[in-house]
Image: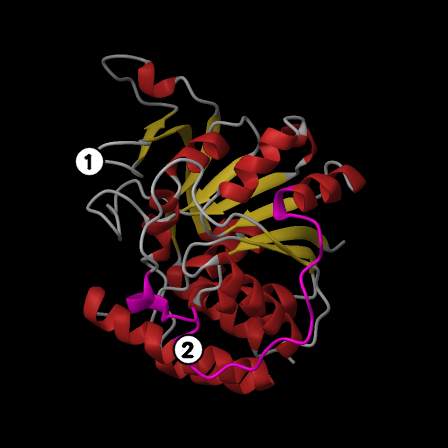
Amino acid sequence: MRTPIIFDTDPGVDDAQAIALIMADPDIEVLGMTTTYGNVPVETATSNALLLAELGGHSIPVAQGAARPLSKTPNPFPTFVHGVNGLGDIDLPTPTTRAVDTTAAQFIVDETRKRPGEITLVAVGPLGNLAVALQLDPTLVDRVKQVIVMGGSVKQGGNVTPLAEANIYSDPHAAHRVFTAGWPLVMVGLDVTHKTHIDPERMARIAKGQGKLGEVLADSYSFYADFYRKALGINGCCPHDSCAVAWLKHPELFKTVRGHMSVITDGLAQGQTVFAPESAVFAEDRWSQTPLIDVCMEVDGERVSQWIEDVLTSH
């Protein structure tokens, strides 16, 4: 059976790679994409999602969602990472399709009511859409098969502050609500995404296998890889969001630890994800009051990268 998902996204170069992946994998049924601000304003994210689906030859409902954080002052958009248009500032055609009238949060609520217990939410941007969906319908936690969040960090530190990963820092209040909702959730954070790389040779093969969509992936990759060359000293890029899709299909490539997650919502450590493993004993139990989740701590990054290539070059 195909795995039905809703993909919550803020495209974004690595989002574009992951969107290509979910469209190319025949075992994934993409019920829709929900968009949020994050790498770009939400209107740009929506336009990019629509365009990527068109270039991939797919008709996928796109529902526009969160335009700003729940509570905090919005961060500047990371144009130095993804470009002003989110896809490396390459020239892009205007999509011919439009978003659906339903908001992202309502789309999530409605689709899960149609197929209770079946749908996985794969969230690879700030988590406002999921937080608002929980507010609209708290019983959502009982209808979702699982939630996969690309975000956060345990041992790697942050990538936008010394402590915080970008998606969580963008909306820590939403992240706290999502991580502590009590639904089946796995966090795919920097501890594994920084150990997974797409080098230029692999991207060239992917681009060749993806037609017009491949041209966008390759051209935007160049901008993104330049950032990673300076930031991490690697020859390539970290396919953060594709790692969340890899967990969906091949969890055996990851090592997870079960435990309690808290998100620091204010102050100097805003956006930090504080993880207390279920097996650990601390001086107090205040770090162990939240519902249990699974956190990816190790990965076979080479096998994940090879799987990404295999899917994107298989037809």
| Image quarter of residue 70 | top left
Which residue is pictured at 35% across the width and 47% down the height?
74
For label 1, count other residues whose C-alpha is less than 10 Å away and answer few (under 14), some (14-19) or many (20+).
few
The spot of residue 116 in percent (x, y) is 75, 36
Q: What label does residue 55 carry, if any? A: none
Q: Where does the image place residue 135, in percent across and percent down from the top left?
A: 59, 30
Amino acid on which disc 1 is placed: Leu
Against 132, residue 45 (above or below) is below
Magenta span main SS = loop
The residue drawn where x is 21% and y is 65% is: 231
Residue 67 falls left or right of residue 286: right
Amino acid type at circle 2 is Ser
Q: Can you say whether 200 is above or below 66 in the image?
A: below
N-term-proximal mark, 1 vs 2: 2
Query: Please, which residue is most extreme toward the right here?
Result: 114
Residue bearing the label numbered 1: 268
**Disc 2 target residue:** 220
- Whether residue 237 sits left or right of residue 230 in the image: it is right
Asked whether 55 or 292 is in front, the reply is 55
For mark 2, give the secondary structure. helix
Mark 2 crowd level (few <14, some 14–19, many ≥20, 10 Å Cα): many
Q: Which residues are magenta?
A: 78-105
Q: Is residue 101 above or below residue 85?
A: above
